[in-house]
Amino acid sequence: MARDPVRVLVTGAAGQIGYAIVPMVARGVMLGPDQPVILHMLDIEPAAEALKGVKMELIDAAFPLLKGVLATTDVVEACTGVNIAVMVGGFPRKEGMERKDVMSKNVSIYKAQASALEKHAAADCKVLVVANPANTNALILKEFAPSIPEKNITCLTRLDHNRALGQISERVNVQVSDVKNVIIWGNHSSTQYPDVNHATVNTSSGEKPVRELVADDKWLNGDFITTVQQRGAAIIKARKLSSALSAASSACDHIRDWVLGTPKGTWVSMGVYSDGSYGIQSGLIYSFPVTCEGGKWSIVQGEFSLFREIL
């Protein structure tokens, strides 16, 4: 029996991350190989022609799962009926601007988009905020979309989580799929804490703790942490552009696990509304280890006796 299409909104769809993520969504990377999708793509008026070009390419690619494409600069049209919203668009920080300047610009952007989602999105719409500062933008969105449940608004720290997995896999020379249960605590910024104290590696003789296999606490407590924290800046220095492919892939991972569930015994990092767990103030958007089942996430409890010592 054919499945009904899921409507997926990508804001900033003509930008670098948008251009990387829309074919992944259309190919089934986000929601699975048997889930049809209708893409809603939103961007600002100056990007309208580029957005039109992205739509042309999606049509030309002839993705079997893609059942429709809407490309628009109208926020209400873009948000109408969407089941999943990936908020990539935001005001970029420019030279000479302070963080407060970027935040004030994003307030107006996210107020308009949140209001449109509030009024026109599907009742069960799941929202992932990618645009930086992601944690703050998610809080802004929630403020102006009060009827969207708190558990349906998240921000992306899966990119940092995947970066940590990648660093460990390279260090111990294993496939990245053999490493699991790293944790990103905190903010999607250089203040985050990448934690491997409960991470393991699948070896021929069973699961082994990362610390045991790496056998280099100086690296794990130093260069590993700073590499993950500053990876975005390193990519900008190398590419002269910010992360796009990795951010898009991580956003797909985030939504896929949220919707389809995490494997048994595996947790992932998501920026979610704090319920007070681990002493983090309730109501903040904060990255925790979570498991997902039945389209819902849950903060992993009772596993992390070292957490308070880390902080």
Image: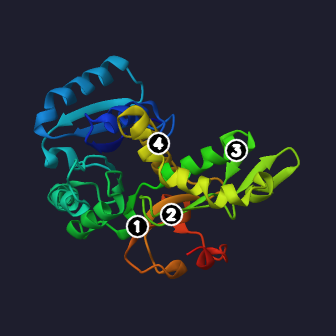
Q: Secondary structure at mark 1?
A: helix
Three-letter residue code for mark 1 = Lys
Q: Position of residue 192 (x, y in %)?
A: 48, 63
Residue that numbered label 1 is attached to: 151
Amino acid under label 4? Answer: Leu
Q: Which mark is residue 171?
A: 3
Secondary structure beneath disc 3?
Answer: helix
Q: Residue furthest right?
A: 205
**Which is nearer the N-term, disc 1 or disc 4?**
4
Examine the image and state in which quarter residue 74 appears.
Answer: top left
Q: Earlier in the sequence, mark 4 or mark 3?
A: 4
Find out whether the residues at labels 4 and 3 contact each other: C-beta distance under 8 Å.
no
Look at mark 4 in the image and give the residue it sits on. Answer: 31
Check disc 3 and give the amino acid type: Arg
Mark closer to the chain start, 1 or 3:
1
Instruction: Name the front one of labels 4 and 3.
Output: 3
Q: Which residue is under mark 2?
A: 297
CA separation, marks 1 and 3? 35 Å
Rendering coords of residue 166 (x, y %): 61, 44
